[in-house]
Image (cartoon, grey):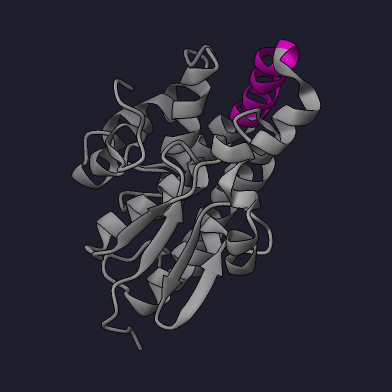
Amino acid sequence: MASHAKPVLYSYFRSSCSWRVRIALALKGIEYDQAPVNLIKDGGQQLSDDYGTLNPMRQVPAITIDGITLSQSLAIIQYLDETRPTPRLLPDDPKKRAQVRMISDVIAAGIQPLQVNNLAVLQKVGDDKKLEWAQHFIIKGFNALEKILQQTAGQYCVGDEISMADLCLVPQVYNAERFKVDLKPYPTITRINITLIELDAFKVSHPSYQPDTPPGL
């Protein structure tokens, strides 16, 4: 049962994982407070003892909601969908639901953790290799994702209803553009992204419009 207490989202403006959750909250019309966690300032605020107590993985996002604390963006989105099911982000049809989870995992587990906007990876790779590293793993992932979407997509990633897969797609395309990946080989990815970024829920959740967005970004 949903609680009347306002949720608190611990996030970082440019975090892909945080962005996915912000989109879900916006789509479902859930009011919440943000508690920014700066992944760079003070050596990384996610590494503080206080935040480590909240989220032992010391990552963003985390959310306090309904008397519990959750981390991991896909787990948070699925909890929101189970407790606040309108609009539905995981289809009722089990085949489509499996496709949504497959696409979400391709992005959230197969691409995003390996690219260099993941600070833990950047520390290992080094600044001089970060562009080459990011492009390699984004291109590898997009080559697979384009083929999958050619089979599953309608207006959006799976058919004509927005799903959790779309919440993963938009932040990943944003990262691809940041790292100068040529998107011309990915017409399906590009078409879906162009449609999604015009929707209000995707606009208000964009990294440019968050309380911790640096001035002038």
* Residue 124 vertical position relative to residue 74 in the rendered view, above or below: above
In percent of width and height, residue 178 lies at 49, 19
Q: Nearer the viewer, residue 77 or 39?
A: 39
Q: Tell me the quarter of the picture where residue 143 sits.
A: top right
| Quadrant assignment for the N terminus | bottom left
The vertical placement of 128 against 63, above or below, is above
Q: Can you give x and y, in whole percent of width and height, for residue 46 in the image?
A: 59, 50
- Give the residue furthest to the bottom: 1
State the residue lying farthest toward the right: 124
142 part of magenta stretch? yes
Q: Which residues are magenta?
A: 128-143
Residue 4 seen: yes
Instruction: State the residue at coordinates (37%, 65%).
Output: 8
For the point 26% across and 83% down, which residue is it? 4
Q: Is residue 92 visible?
A: no
Residue at coordinates 54% horizontally, 30% vertically from top-left? 146
Between 156 and 15, the one nearer to me in the picture: 15
Residue 97 lies left or right of residue 109; in this view the side is left
Q: Is residue 179 left or right of residue 177?
A: right
